[in-house]
Amino acid sequence: MTDSILIHNCTLAVTAADTLREDGWLLTRGDTIAAIGTADTRTQAETTEATTIIDAQGKMLAPGLINGHNHCAMTLFRGLADDLELAAWLTEHIFPAEAAHVNEEMVYHCSKLAAAEMILSGTTSVADGYFFEGQAARAFVDSGMRAVAAQGVIDFPAPGVPDPAGNLEAAARFLDEWQDRNPRITPAIFAHSPYTCSAATLQGAKRMAMERQVPFFIHAAESRQEQEMIREPRGTSPVRHLAALGLLDPDTICIHGIWLDEEDLDLLAQSRAGVIVCPQSHLKLASGIAPVSAMLKRNIRVGLGTDGCASNNSLDMFREMDILSKTQKLHTLEATSLSARQALRCATSSNAEILGLGKTGQLLPGYKADLILLDMQQPHLSPCYNQDLLVYGASGADVRSVIIDGRLVMHDKKILSFDVEDTMREVRRLAGAICEHQGRNRG
């Protein structure tokens, strides 16, 4: 018998734009939403079919949030190097820490810790990019999350790829291992950036992504100085460099997109490449504010991510939505420049479309059963007129239950899919090795 979950007596937030529906119910069948409605449309059949029934009185049922950009294993480096500008943060702290401490064990446990944080705060899918990405994919499978897992490619010695001449071969091995292996895992390629990858590497990585029909990610236009760091530039900006190399198309996803001029915006619009912005990381590293409202006016596909814990330091997408909308208002000095509904769409259906996740990000029959329940019986969530409150008032701490792929992975704030305490112990052990290493270096 196929597992089926009936959630009833809830408020329904079907999409980012829909009017809230009271006295709602939703039925899952296997990994899919089978039916949805209000109390007057429910029949005895829905109740009889359900193998699990959840009375969600006082709760809101919403689509699971999608984190469009993360380096999940970097939970180990949370708080390791704060209050630094991007170049110093990367070259003096993060790259050396990765060289010394990133290995298969670290990526597995630390990605699993990120999964715990995301599940607890209502994120059901993540786009991740890192080294030893097969171990990250294994962590997502074991945690119950849906993920686009991308193997990192860079023209420097990297964890797992000591000789950069083998970076594309490592990516190919990852794709061989994970394509069609698990329905919740979409393998992909992540070329680090135009300034850490040569033109030949970028074109080779994109060619592989096209041949394998997988997404291609790249950091682009994150800092004001980025263009000066690109070797043998083919264009006069990072985006024009990528365009000249033939890398921009609907299957390319540019991360950050802060320093964009009018020509860059036109190229992104024409190519239909996606852009994932990470506003809290941009603020913390003083990188700038991405022109999201200008992108949306050009119908550029824009999504939202947290970035890794080392540059955020939180993976709470509710926080990210709030900051996205408010920084756009500050950037343009227009209170209407980016609404709460647009921010919510960036974290749900827009991310799903950009990442190629298919029917996710909305509560509709036939869509994947990736759902979250929020406790609305809280002073800071009362009264609730519409879903704008999810952006401006809610936080990940308000999420009570999470269903991913039709499976209850968190209920009443307890993760059911794996032992979180064990994962935290493993990560604390790994962090102890960093402290010892730093002590030896200071000595």
Image (tube, grey):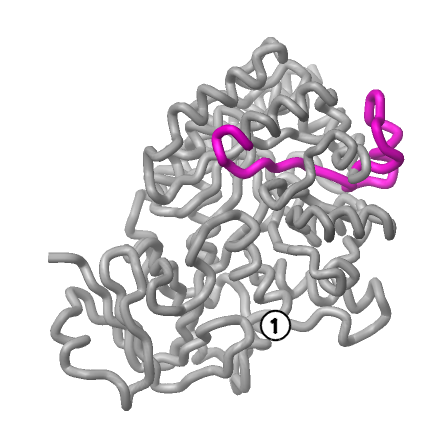
* Picture quadrant of residue 7: bottom left
Q: Quadrant of the N terminus?
A: bottom left
The residue identified by callout 1 is: 341
Q: Relative to residue 81, is residue 66 drawn left or right?
A: left
Q: Relative to residue 263, is residue 89 drawn left or right?
A: left
Q: Position of residue 110 (x, y in %)?
A: 47, 35
Q: Amino acid at mark 1?
A: Arg
Residue 302 seen from this side:
yes
Q: Position of residue 166 (x, y in %)?
A: 57, 12
Q: Secondary structure at mark 1?
A: helix
From this view, report whether residue 304 is shown above or below residue 77: below
From this view, report whether residue 155 is shown above or below residue 381: above
* Picture quadrant of residue 371: bottom left
Which residue is at 61% across, 29% downward? 206
Q: Position of residue 47 (x, y in %)?
A: 16, 76
Q: Which residues are magenta?
A: 210-238
Q: Nearer the viewer, residue 112 or 413?
A: 112
